[in-house]
């Protein structure tokens, strides 16, 4: 039953993508193309959620081969549960983005290349679906490249701007470097396995020597990691996200970089099989460094969308820490822990997709309404755009891991499951995993600073510029899309007991063990089994509430419990208590209402407010070793001594690793390219001669 | 040339808080006091003495007294200078921004009673003309020890040394 | 660097004044405040030298609110402790005290008052 539902929904979604692209191409007027775009996108989103959910509940779909003229065998579509999970994420992100686009694309100022955007959007969606449903390396790579090029084209949507063109080109360049690694990894596996579908690749992995498998792992990690944005391949992310229109940057951050995570999971957990322990530790270390560097740069950045982009880097780092720990646990033959930490990482993937979409849509609403994304020019939006502010605040609380929103649950689970390192046999491995846990804790702390700063300076206080002062609330469809995601953040944060068993369905085939009962102990069913002690401790106290009990991270020596659903009640109770206490201790006597203190002068002006730069300054000073900010200071003295006419003080923080790694690398590349220009004369005849010589060479080699 | 002035007895009801209130304030601030200092037209003589209060020698932090940068956190307003008219408005704003109960101390001859500037078209000449003053610390400038004494007197932690004296004129007289 | 400061602090010991637990006497020659000796003052004889030299009018002649009696007031609030009055006083009725604890709660407490008896002569002149 569910197989049929999944298949029908999946193929209908793909068909709708094709139909949507065609319709948007043919519709003559923009007034018509936007409804077509919105309705089709939302329908695709809903169908993907249905299809993914059916896949998670049931068995993998039967294999579906498409005959291809290429010499690699048929292209195979066969989504499994992992693919189904990512289908749900694509759907969950796409549906609100579609709704949001109604007012976003239709509003003023009008987008110039609307038709191109809408057509390419649907092709991109189809490519995304194919990436996660492909069971064949060739189809996967083809869809991957389509995705890379289309996201390039869509980011350059407003290609008249040189900065946007540069950012998009950077994104394409890093993506292509990554593709090189992916192709190499798949070729190594396919050569050993004798075919390109996943079954062949798995067989090939089993036959490879350990050294070759290590090579495949590193190549795949680098290749997919470039798309995910792990250090040192993160350079494109903070450039491309602000350049893209906001509905696309939401898709970029919530889905496309997650497909890099999908690729890493697919190759390392599914295709390669169990590897040596250092794979996991390498991934974990890379993830920890990525997370810390990402959130640090998010804290000092002033462009709202760049903050979100850096925070995406951070979250990718957190997910990689989880994946790395899962790999390490699996190598140490501890599948239970591996499954638990993997579930935490997957939950974080889901959570990050929801709140980051929400935040990008919120940033897009701000940009659409004020024309700026610079925190230093915003402010005061809480009165002018209350709905947007509220939704952005929910997203910020979720990403800062504040209960009762969803970021808290997954980050807590990640941290707690990483603390189960005492089970690992090697001391060095334990130390690395604990270091990863420390990095997560540090990251969570700084994330609070970063998003207090983003909300506090961007939305609260007084408007700093005229643009911000004349902001108006965005249209209904944009508000509805953000509200939907905000509610999703709340539900994912309060009802994880329903989500975690579903994620267990994803990890069960990967590790061969189900940990549903270990994570969400069946206390209410009367069959508590090993968790009978919890019943005695009051675990069944809230039997009447439809929340399915507690979340538990088990270990041989100690268990850790959280109850996100009950946490809401506790928070409400604490709030009520706090209000009561405040009422009780309120001093007797009259209250005075006074004007805001403005240093003694009559009115408080917007430029007296704490600036975003000033707010981040302590962090910038403490972590100067990482930021390496450059200060430019030029006092210009006038003729009269001691009389300074103008002072230029500028502090710039270069992107991470840009001066250390990318500058010399790009210098070397352009030197090489300069040398290679010798053979390029621009003369067509000469090029034909090259082709002729090449054909001749091939023929000679064949003849030998 | 001798000048004669006709001065009323100071109206103590404006310039002095009630005894009960003073006792309550002393109870509240006894061991912890935060000061906001406002320069209302001072020559900076008083400031250089006030600055010394936080030096290692005088170190008023040992007495639980601290300076803050905002009146929102302050319990005591320490005013120096001859109260120029330009500073009247900021002074009153500062006072209004302070939470209650609040104390006001006039520091130096100028804030106490005009000093060498007195009352003019530019100065009010005394702090008590606009704010209820709790303690006067005379001196030009008052030494840091005098300042400490004044602050502790305000808190009820020191005794007042000076009292109104009415001296009998010389006894032998002249017939 | 930081260790050097620590050692310096250690070697220097406590420099903080014992005030207010114990008195901290001022140095020699410290001009604390002028003090008026009513016995020696010749204000009744019409001597107003100190009133004339006092720039901030800390020493002044006042008419008591009843409108008849007058008095000499030494008001420490506006006094700048310059000592000119001490130098000018022909009878030595004024001298500088070295005490520094001058704070008062009420402006009257900073005043020293010498009431004047009105000697009205037969022709109506004072």
Image (cartoon, coloured by chain):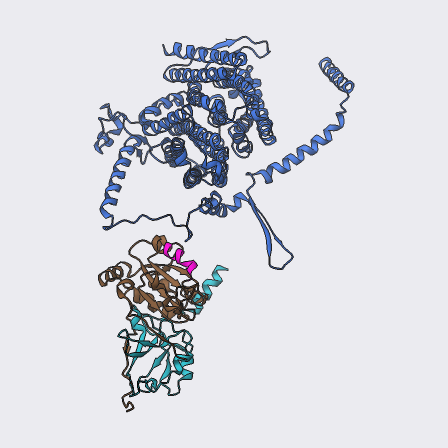
In this rendering, the answer to whether B142 lies above or below A549 is below
Residue C82 percent location from the top left of the image: 42, 77
Per the picture, the main secondary structure of the magenta-coloured stretch is helix
Residue nearest the viewer, comparing C80 with A287: C80
Specify the quadrant of the image occupied by residue C107: bottom left
Disc tally is 0
The chain coloured cyan is C
Which shade is chain A?
blue
In this rendering, the answer to whether C5 lies above or below A381 is below
Q: Which residues are magenta?
A: B84-93
Q: Is residue A218 magenta?
A: no
Give left or right: position of A377 versus A545. Answer: right
Specify the quadrant of the image occupied by residue A336: top left
Residue nearest the viewer, comparing A647 with A214: A647
Which shade is chain B?
brown
Q: Is residue A427 visible?
A: no
Residue B56 percent location from the top left of the image: 42, 66
In this rendering, the answer to whether A565 lies above or below B34 is above
Give left or right: position of B124 versus A251. Answer: left
Instruction: Classify the position of the C terminus of chain A by image quarter.
Output: top right
Specify the quadrant of the image occupied by residue A173: top right
Residue A348 percent location from the top left of the image: 41, 29
């Amino acid at each position: 039953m569910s197989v049929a539902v999944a298949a029908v929904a999946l193929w209908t979604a793909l068909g709708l993508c094709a139909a949507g692209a065609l319709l948007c191409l043919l519709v003559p007027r923009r007034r018509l193309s936007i409804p077509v775009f919105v309705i089709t996108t939302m329908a695709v989103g809903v169908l993907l959620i249905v299809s993914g959910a059916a896949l998670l509940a049931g068995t993998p779909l039967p294999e579906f081969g498409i005959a291809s003229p290429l010499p690699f065998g048929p292209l195979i579509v066969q989504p499994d549960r992992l693919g189904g999970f990512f289908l749900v994420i694509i759907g969950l992100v796409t549906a609100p983005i579609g709704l949001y686009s109604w007012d976003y694309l239709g509003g003023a100022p009008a987008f110039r290349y609307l038709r191109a955007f809408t057509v390419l959007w649907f092709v991109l969606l189809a490519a995304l679906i194919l990436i996660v449903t492909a069971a064949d390396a060739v189809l996967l790579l083809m869809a991957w490249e389509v995705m890379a090029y289309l996201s390039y084209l869509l980011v350059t949507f407003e290609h008249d701007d040189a900065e946007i063109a540069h950012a998009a080109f950077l994104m394409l360049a890093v993506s292509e470097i990554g593709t090189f690694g992916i192709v190499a990894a798949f070729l190594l596996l396919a050569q050993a396995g004798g075919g390109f579908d996943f079954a062949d690749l798995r067989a090939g992995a089993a036959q490879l020597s350990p050294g070759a498998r290590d090579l495949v792992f590193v190549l795949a990690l680098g290749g997919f990691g470039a798309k995910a944005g792990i250090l040192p391949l993160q350079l494109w992310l903070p450039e491309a996200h602000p350049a893209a229109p906001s509905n696309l940057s939401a898709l970029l951050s919530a889905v496309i970089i997650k497909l890099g995570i999908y690729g890493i999971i697919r190759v390392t957990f599914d295709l390669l099989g169990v590897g040596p322990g250092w794979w996991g530790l390498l991934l974990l270390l890379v993830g920890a460094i990525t997370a810390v560097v990402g959130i640090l740069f998010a804290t000092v950045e002033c462009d709202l969308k760049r903050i979100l982009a850096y925070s995406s880097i951070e979250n990718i780092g957190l997910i990689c820490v989880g994946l790395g720990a899962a790999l390490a646990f699996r190598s140490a033959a501890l599948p239970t822990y591996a499954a638990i930490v993997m579930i935490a990482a997957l939950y974080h993937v889901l959570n990050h997709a929801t709140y980051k979409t929400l935040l990008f849509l919120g940033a897009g609403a701000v940009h659409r309404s004020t024309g700026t994304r610079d925190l230093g020019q915003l402010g005061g939006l809480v009165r002018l755009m209350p709905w947007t502010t509220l939704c952005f605040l929910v997203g910020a609380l979720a990403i800062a891991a504040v209960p009762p929103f969803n970021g808290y649950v997954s980050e807590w689970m990640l941290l707690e499951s990483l603390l189960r390192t005492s089970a690992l046999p090697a001391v060095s491995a334990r130390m690395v995993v604990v270091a990863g846990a420390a990095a997560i804790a540090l990251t969570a702390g700084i994330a609070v600073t970063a998003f207090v700063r983003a909300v506090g300076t961007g939305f609260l206080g007084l408007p700093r510029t005229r643009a911000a002062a004349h902001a108006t609330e965005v249209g209904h469809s944009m508000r509805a899309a953000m509200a939907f995601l905000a509610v999703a953040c709340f539900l994912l944060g309060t009802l994880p007991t329903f989500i975690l068993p579903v994620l267990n369905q994803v990890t069960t085939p990967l590790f061969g063990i189900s940990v549903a009962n270990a994570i969400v102990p069946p206390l209410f069913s009367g069959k508590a089994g090993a968790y009978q002690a919890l019943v005695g401790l009051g675990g069944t106290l809230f039997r009447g509430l439809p929340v399915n009990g507690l979340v538990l991270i088990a270990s041989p020596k100690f268990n850790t419990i959280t109850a996100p659903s009950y946490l809401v009640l506790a928070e409400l109770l604490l709030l009520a208590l706090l209000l009561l206490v405040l009422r009780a201790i309120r001093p007797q006597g009259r209250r005075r209402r006074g004007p805001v203190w403005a240093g003694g002068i009559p009115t408080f002006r917007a430029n007296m407010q704490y600036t975003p730069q000033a707010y981040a300054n302590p962090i910038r000073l403490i972590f100067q070793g990482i930021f390496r900010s450059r200060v430019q200071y030029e006092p210009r003295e006038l003729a009269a001594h001691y009389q300074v006419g103008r002072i230029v003080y500028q502090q710039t923080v270069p992107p991470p690793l840009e001066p250390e790694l990318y500058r010399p690398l790009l210098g070397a590349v352009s030197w090489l390219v300069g040398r290679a220009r010798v053979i390029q004369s621009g003369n067509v005849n000469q090029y034909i001669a090259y082709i002729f010589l090449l054909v001749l060479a091939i023929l000679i080699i064949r003849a030998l | 040339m001798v000048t004669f002035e006709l001065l009323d007895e100071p109206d103590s009801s404006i310039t002095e808080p009630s005894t009960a209130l003073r006792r309550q304030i002393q109870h509240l601030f006894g061991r912890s006091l935060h000061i906001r200092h406002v320069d209302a037209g001072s020559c900076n003589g008083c400031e250089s003495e006030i600055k010394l209060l936080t030096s290692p020698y005088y170190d008023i932090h040992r007495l639980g007294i601290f300076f803050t940068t905002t009146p929102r956190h302050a319990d005591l307003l320490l005013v120096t200078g001859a109260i120029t008219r330009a500073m009247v408005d900021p002074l009153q704003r500062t006072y209004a921004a302070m939470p209650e109960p609040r104390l006001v101390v006039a520091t130096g001859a100028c804030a106490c009673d005009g000093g060498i500037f007195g009352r003019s078209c530019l100065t009010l000449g005394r702090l008590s003309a606009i704010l209820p003053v709790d303690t006067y610390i005379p001196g030009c400038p008052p030494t840091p020890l005098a300042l400490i004494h004044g602050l502790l007197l305000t808190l009820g932690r020191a005794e007042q040394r000076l009292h109104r004296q009415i001296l009998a004129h010389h006894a032998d007289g002249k017939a | 660097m930081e260790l050097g400061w620590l050692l310096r602090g250690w070697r220097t010991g406590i420099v903080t004044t014992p005030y207010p637990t114990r008195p901290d006497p001022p140095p020699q020659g410290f001009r604390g405040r002028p003090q008026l000796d009513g016995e020696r003052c010749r204000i009744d004889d019409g001597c107003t030298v100190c009133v004339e030299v006092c720039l901030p009018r800390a020493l002044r002649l006042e008419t008591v609110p009843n409108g008849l009696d007058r008095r000499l007031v030494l008001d420490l609030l506006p006094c700048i402790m310059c000592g000119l009055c001490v130098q000018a006083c022909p009878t030595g009725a004024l001298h500088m005290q070295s005490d520094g604890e001058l704070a008062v709660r009420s402006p009257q407490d900073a005043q020293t008052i010498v009431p004047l008896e009105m000697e009205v002569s037969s022709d109506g002149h004072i």
